[in-house]
Image: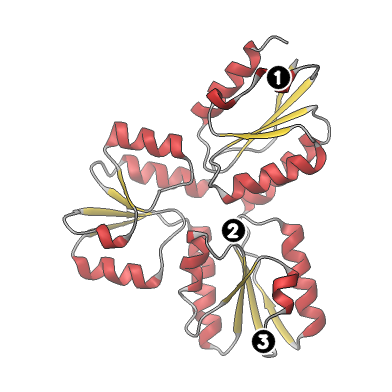
Amino acid sequence: MQIKLAKSYGFCFGVKRAIRIAEDSKDASTIGPLIHNNEEIKRLKENYNVETLDSVNEIDGVKRAIIRTHGITKQDLAKLDSSGTEIIDATCPYVTKPQKICEQMSKEGYDVVIFGDKNHPEVKGVQSYAVDGARVVGGVEELKKLGLNNKIALVSQTTRKVEEFLEIVNFLVAKYKEVRVFNTICNATFENQDATRELSKEADIMIVVGGKNSSNTKQLYSIAKENCYDSFLVENENELRKEWFIDKKLCGVTAGASTPNWIIEKIIGKISKIKV
């Protein structure tokens, strides 16, 4: 069986930057998981004593706090500032951008709409910067239920599908007088999604590697599944199943933006040894 990697996959700029910051900040604690990859979080804890706090409310006694790649809410940042803890900011610059847009547009009187998952930490952080609040929608059907004024500013969670974002854009432009669209989907997301789409059209089986709580990894899995029925999302090599590979000629492999190369290499190594 042939194994083929997607043309673009794995660690993005923001995650590489955050990992480097964490490795240089031994004995620190992150506010929430630094990235959405349990295996890498475990490695940072074991090798660099980087702990993970569930929330900013656990900051008492912590000398150094790392802000996760997804960012935190404006309110939590204020708590950190007043705690006296040393703050190390690992927020991805692609996440900082929609935060600033939401703050500025809401000050200018726009209704702010965020396309994304309302329960995702990135979206919660971005939403908190809108002075008068922001509406979060997962698709056009949710958007139809909102009562908006005629001045709208639209941003997106950085890891969403561009096709779904365009559906939101088209609906708003057709219905409202003034719509300001800010494409805040990051470049790595575009490239990884396009590469996954291309590979999944020729593969007999797709293995998507990454955290099951990772938004961008779940988007890659969704894209792979659209084109290749036998697509599977795994976090590590122990989740691979021999029966998946029966009668398969080409195995495509892609990985989310929070997936380090050492995990991908382990998975490829195990796939290459499977005999069916």
Residue under label 1 = 243
Comes first in the chain, label 3 or label 2: 3
Comes first in the chain, label 1 or label 3: 3
Give the SS element for disc 3. Answer: loop
Q: Viewed as shown, does residue 237 lie left or right of 87?
A: right
Instruction: Name the residue located 79 percent from the left edge and 20 percent from the top edge.
Output: 248
Give the SS element for disc 2. Answer: loop
Looking at the image, which is closer to me, 118 or 217? 118
Residue under label 3 = 148
Q: Tell me the kind of residue under disc 2.
A: Thr
Q: Which mark is residue 158?
A: 2
Instruction: Name the residue located 37 percent from the left edge and 33 percent from the top edge.
Output: 43
**Residue 51 x %, y %:** 29, 44
Q: Residues within 10 Å of mark 1 (few under 14, many from 20)?
A: few
Instruction: Name the residue located 82 percent from the left edge and 80 percent from the top edge.
Output: 174
Quarter of the image for the C terminus: give it: top right
The Cα atoms of the two marked residues, 1 and 3, are separated by: 51 Å
Q: Nearer the viewer, mark 1 or mark 3?
A: 1
Give the SS element for disc 1. Answer: helix
Vertical position of residue 70 compared to residue 148: above or below: above
The quarter of the displayed image where residue 45 is located: top left
The Cα atoms of the two marked residues, 3 and 2, are separated by: 23 Å
Q: Tell me the kind of residue under disc 3.
A: Leu
Comes first in the chain, label 1 or label 2: 2
